[in-house]
Image: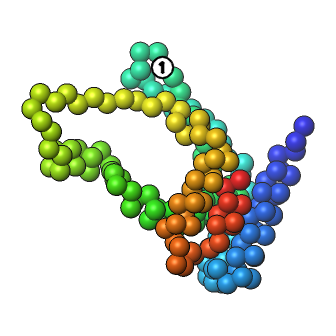
Amino acid sequence: MIYIPTLRQNMAKKVHRLIRLLLQEGHIDEMEAKWLSLTPDPLRIPVFYTFTKIHKPTPVGRPITSGCDSPTEMISSFVDHLLQPIAQRQALYPKDTTDFLNFISEKTKLPKNTILVTMDVTSLYTNIPQEEGITTVCEAYEEFYRENPPIPSRYLREMSV
């Protein structure tokens, strides 16, 4: 059996080691290192729960993992900050439902008698092989930041595991 406080401490040590390396190699400054090092005491293991979809014929739970106050909360936010510009440059990046509806109604010319069809992809994220997903994200990161990456992709890869 794995002792939970040990897991938290090991994860916190890994995160702080990454922050030190990023600082030592000049990829982040002191202020960023302090921000990334902000962790509550005591650390919290991410909490898993389900959000019930009551609109479905058979109510099912959508799995949610809350990483609030976990050792990886700040570093996850940092990775999100690095990846958002890449996601937003995709050909079709709807910010929200309203943005998508505006795109469909204003920018899409459809022939008469066209039938719009939607589909619901279930468990897309959980079905992406982790290593393949990380590799794809790192390749997109390297291509996007070709001239001047904020941090080397090897650290991005390490933050993802």
Residue that badge 1 annotates: 59
Closest to the observer, 153 or 78: 153
Closest to the observer, 45 or 93: 93
Residue 56, given in percent of the width and then of the height, sits at: 41, 20
Left/right of residue 30 with respect to residue 122 in the rendered view: right
For the N terminus, the quadrant is top right
Residue at (52% x, 66% y) in the render: 143
Closest to the observer, 147 or 9: 147
Residue 96, given in percent of the width and then of the height, sits at: 32, 49
Residue 24, given in percent of the width and then of the height, sits at: 74, 82
Does 113 appear above or below 66?
A: above
Residue 69 visible in this rendered orientation of the protein:
no
Does 73 appear above or below 51?
A: below
Name which residue type carries label 1. Answer: Pro
Left/right of residue 156 with respect to residue 140 in the rendered view: right
Residue 87, given in percent of the width and then of the height, sits at: 44, 58
Does 152 appear above or below 63?
A: below
Which picture quadrant has residue 40?
A: bottom right
The outermost residue toward the right is 1
Which picture quadrant has residue 158?
A: bottom right
Residue 101 visible in this rendered orientation of the protein:
yes
Q: Residues within 10 Å of mark 1 (few under 14, many from 20)?
A: few
Describe the element under mark 1 as helix, strand or loop.
loop
Residue at (57% x, 56% y) in the render: 137
Q: How is the image coloured?
A: rainbow
The outermost residue toward the top is 57
Residue at (45% x, 27% y) in the render: 53
